[in-house]
Amino acid sequence: MKARPKHELPVIPTANLVDIAILLIIFYMACSNFVSKQASNLKLPKSPDIDRLNEPLIVVAIDNTGGIRVQGQPVSGTADVESRVTELVRGQTDPEKRRVMFRCDAGIKHNVFAPVLEAIVAGGGIVTAVGEKPPAK
Amino acid sequence: MYRRPRKKQLTQDAIPTTSLADMMFLLLIFFIMTATLARVTGIVTDMPAGSKTQQAQAIKNVYLSIHDNQITVDDKDMNLEQTEAYLKGLNLAKRNEDARVVVLSATGRENYQLYYRMMSLIQKYGGVVAIESEEGTGK
């Protein structure tokens, strides 16, 4: 009797699967928007009356020591904030592109943050004051 | 004649990579599950620029001030709930642009938390926040 030829089961090639997985991991690691390190030592104010927003491109931050940063770079004072904001919003007619994310520590005093807010407005920016929603009780 | 069975070849030339895929997928699942995308929450306040004198004097704006953690709205001391009810009752959203302005002032000692709370309340009820600095140069 003639033996039936053995049919080998088709094998799905999985060697390239690793490469795809690695690429995906690299993608996630590279593209994940980690919490901005600029002035990360600040505690945002809390309010239940805030909404989710699109992240503006311009960031002005005041950390818990009162240090002011524009786009992550320390600035000397409010005059510097105004000139940097003016420079960044120059030629922008779209209000969405003139929005300035204002991140300020909740404990900062009015005499520190108010001049910065005024400088942003004077520089042509639209203030987007960032805060956190208090945890639901 | 007895033939000794061939020894199974124990040494391999290539590094086994079959389990690498499993590990990679575990890592991938870990990243996907644990990644929390940063969400920006806040308020957009289109603060009017310019001094108080440039604004029309005929319009009576709402004045909200914070002094020693005490809220005063149009010369009346209020707590947070009363302030919210007052702002709600003003129907700021139905007013025209200039009449929607709420002048927010504070002493230099007030911290940002209460100020922010007030800004978000004004915004919630359709008001436009105008900062008044201590020197009185309203913006």
Image (spheres, rainbow, N blue to C red):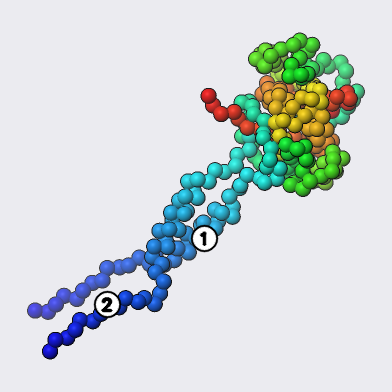
Q: Are marks 1 and 2 on the same chain?
A: no
Horizontal side of A47 relative to A9 (left or right) equals right
Distance from the alpha carbon under mark 1 to that under mark 2: 37 Å
Chain label for disc 1 = A
Residue B6: which disc?
A: none
Q: Position of residue A30 (x, y in %)?
A: 59, 55
Q: Is residue A97 in view?
A: no
Q: Going by the picture, which residue comes out furthest to the top?
A: B76
Under mark 1, the amino acid is Leu
Horizontal side of B111 relative to A28 (left or right) equals right
The residue under the point 50% across, 50% down is: B31
Under mark 2, the amino acid is Lys
> In which quadrant is the N terminus of chain A drawn?
bottom left
Q: Secondary structure at mark 2?
A: loop
Residue B8: which disc?
A: 2
Residue B72's quadrant in the figure? Answer: top right
The residue closer to the viewer here, B103 or B96, is B103
Chain label for disc 2 = B
B90 shown above or below B38: above
Q: Position of residue A114 (x, y in %)?
A: 80, 30
Q: Position of residue A80 (x, y in %)?
A: 85, 43
Q: Is residue B115 in view?
A: yes
The residue under the point 78% across, 13% down is: B74
Q: Position of residue B67 (x, y in %)?
A: 78, 18
Residue A23: which disc?
A: 1
The residue closer to the viewer here, B127 or B7, is B7
Q: Secondary structure at mark 1?
A: helix
Mark 1, mark 2: which one is toward the viewer? Answer: 2
